[in-house]
Image (cartoon, rainbow, N blue to C red):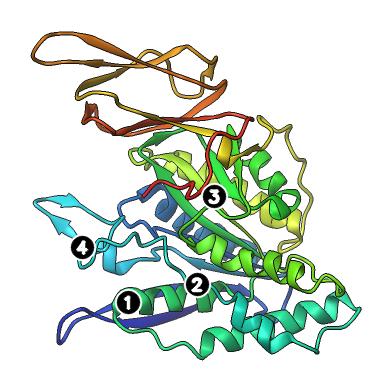
Amino acid sequence: MRERCFSLPGRGPGTSHQILTLSFGNPDARPHVHVQGGLHADEGPGMMVARLLADLLVEAEAAGRLCGHVTVVPFANPLGLGQVLHHNHSGRFDLYDGRNFNRDYPDLTDDAAARLEGRLTDDPQRNTGLVRAALRASLNERQPVGPAEALRHHLMDLALDADVVLDLHCDGEAEMHLYTQPGAWDRLAPLAALTRCRAVLLAEVSGGNPFDEALSGPWTALAKRFPDHPIPLGCASTTVELRGQADVCRTRGMQDARAILDYLTHLGALSGMVDLPPALCSPTPLAGSEVLTAPAAGLLSYAISLGAEVQAGQTVAEITDLETGQVTPVRASTSGVFYARPLDRIAEAGKHLGQIAGDRPLRDGSLLSP
């Protein structure tokens, strides 16, 4: 294992932040898999799993099992880790400007396309190398300003050359689920099976350019721009939602870390054999994910459990008016798995109350929550 510590500038004079990267195997080997936790710094499960995965990789490397290259960032957002307001951790949004730490990553497509003009060949493997070099040159030319942009730039720099990227997150309360692009699904289906995902949400463009999409999106876009030249998907990236914020547990975290280790073995980054379990779900479009919203304010309770199969018209939640006692039902308009909901139980009008993974597109535009 090799350790690298990168220093980010702080917002004020005399301040700085550190990001630790752990590297396993030959840095020039393939496949290269990048795993990070805690980009939303108030989401502990991903940091726990990334840390435990690193411990497992130390053992695997000592046993001579590393065939590829694996990089692990146990805590990807030291800026957010330092944001504590009135004893409560606030790590999803930058308190300086309100921006989501997992949005607004640079789109390298246009600049890379200009660099590739007239250089692509009929050889997919050679084109993969050319695209990686063009994306790398495009990122290197950018000069980030301020700590949040320096963070985005550094995380992109770490993951840009990877074949597979796992960005570990969680929801308020949730079943295991993941987000990815349709073109990456074949490569990530074994991960969904091994981690026992109850929902897989696919979208080519989800909106806001989150970290995972900023890495895989240019490959899809460049393949469309140069249809006469074969460009494989050089980076399959995904956001893995490790259940809910309260699900920080070494026992469960180790189960998830071992599932990811098995996935690395399946990819060939580690030696060994893995038997894939049957999948618990089929992928559905992110546009088909119904976001339930509160029609009124009040106390929130749920009529069904997470993971339940919901039918259109079924009552999912109820809102109790504290003045009148009136109960307002919140019903599903689609059928599918009820896979996520908020952690708190006080609702304001318009609050997002949960998500149902349906197979019929319902939405367009920006498909991710703020």
Residue projecting furthest to the front: 364
Left or right: 80, with 208 as reference point: left
Q: Which of pointers 2 and 1 indicates the residue nearer the eye?
A: 1
Q: Give the quadrant of the N terminus.
A: bottom right
Left or right: 13, with 94 as reference point: left
| Residue shown at 49% from the left, 12% from the top | 313
Front-most of 4 and 337?
Answer: 337
Assess disc 3: are there few (<14), some (14-19) or many (≥20) residues with their C-alpha within 10 Å of its C-alpha. Answer: many
Disc 3 and disc 1 in contact, CB within 8 angstroms: no
Q: Which of pointers 4 and 2 indicates the residue nearer the eye?
A: 4
- Tell me the kind of residue under disc 2: Leu
Which quadrant of the view contains residue 8?
bottom left
- Tell me the kind of residue under disc 4: Leu
Q: Which of pointers 4 and 1 indicates the residue nearer the eye?
A: 4
Q: Which of pointers 3 and 1 indicates the residue nearer the eye?
A: 1
What is the CA distance from the residue labelled 4 to the residue labelled 1?
A: 19 Å
Q: In the figure, 215 relative to 44: above or below?
A: below
What is the CA distance from the residue labelled 3 to the residue labelled 2?
A: 15 Å
- Tell me the kind of residue under disc 3: Ala
What is the CA distance from the residue labelled 4 to the residue labelled 3?
A: 31 Å
Residue 62 appearing in the image? no
Q: Which of pointers 4 and 3 indicates the residue nearer the eye?
A: 4
Disc 4 and disc 2 in contact, CB within 8 angstroms: no
Pointer 4 residue: 95
Q: Earlier in the sequence, mark 3 or mark 2?
A: 2
Assess disc 1: are there few (<14), some (14-19) or many (≥20) residues with their C-alpha within 10 Å of its C-alpha. Answer: some
Pointer 3 residue: 257
Pointer 1 residue: 18
Front-most of 17 and 182?
Answer: 182
SS at badge 3: helix
What is the CA distance from the residue labelled 3 to the residue labelled 1?
A: 24 Å
